[in-house]
Amino acid sequence: MPSDLERAMETLIMVFHRYAGKEGSDVSLSRKELKQLMETELSSFLKSQKDPAAVDRIMKDLDATGDGEVNFEEFVSLVVGLSIACEQLLQKHKHQWVSKSNK
Ligand SMILES: [Ca+2]
């Protein structure tokens, strides 16, 4: 049976291909595919950002090869970046909670 981490990796691959396969190349996300992926799979992140230009900016940042498409490697770097931001927020909240409960 796969572990939590193995399942998470499998999910990353599955989600990427679910959107990458919608149009054009099967192994990369077009701007439209990336927008759909972010709106559906990262909706709470986008909501908290409240920035309509966010997808365009993220697309530009991610597209290291400059071909207007986001490949799996570029997609994973987005997920890693978001995970790091989440973990930092979590640590911050944990510290706040600990200092509050100690008062
Ligand atoms: Ca595609």
Image (cartoon, rainbow, N blue to C red):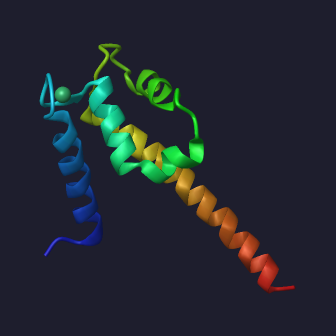
Residue 84 rendering spot, x and y as whole percentages: 52, 51
Q: Residue at x 78, y 85 (%)?
A: 101
**Farthest residue, direction top:** 67
Q: Residue at x 19, y 34 (%)?
A: 20
**How many callouts does the rendering have?**
0
Q: Residue at x 31, y 37 (%)?
A: 36
Is 58 displayed left or right of 10 in the figure?
right
Residue 22 rendering spot, x and y as whole percentages: 15, 33
Residue 86 rendering spot, x and y as whole percentages: 54, 56
Residue 29 rendering spot, x and y as whole percentages: 25, 29
Is 101 displayed left or right of 44 in the figure?
right
Q: Which of these two is toward me, 50 or 7?
A: 50
**Farthest residue, direction bottom:** 102
Picture quadrant of residue 50: top right
Q: Is residue 60 above or below residue 73?
A: above
Q: Residue at x 29, y 13 (%)?
A: 67
Is 62 displayed left or right of 23 in the figure?
right
Q: Determine the quadrant in which ligand 1 lies.
A: top left
* Screen quadrant of the N terminus: bottom left
* Screen quadrant of the C terminus: bottom right
Q: Is residue 14 above or below residue 97?
A: above
Q: Which of these two is toward me, 18 or 75?
A: 18
Q: Which of these two is toward me, 65 or 23?
A: 23
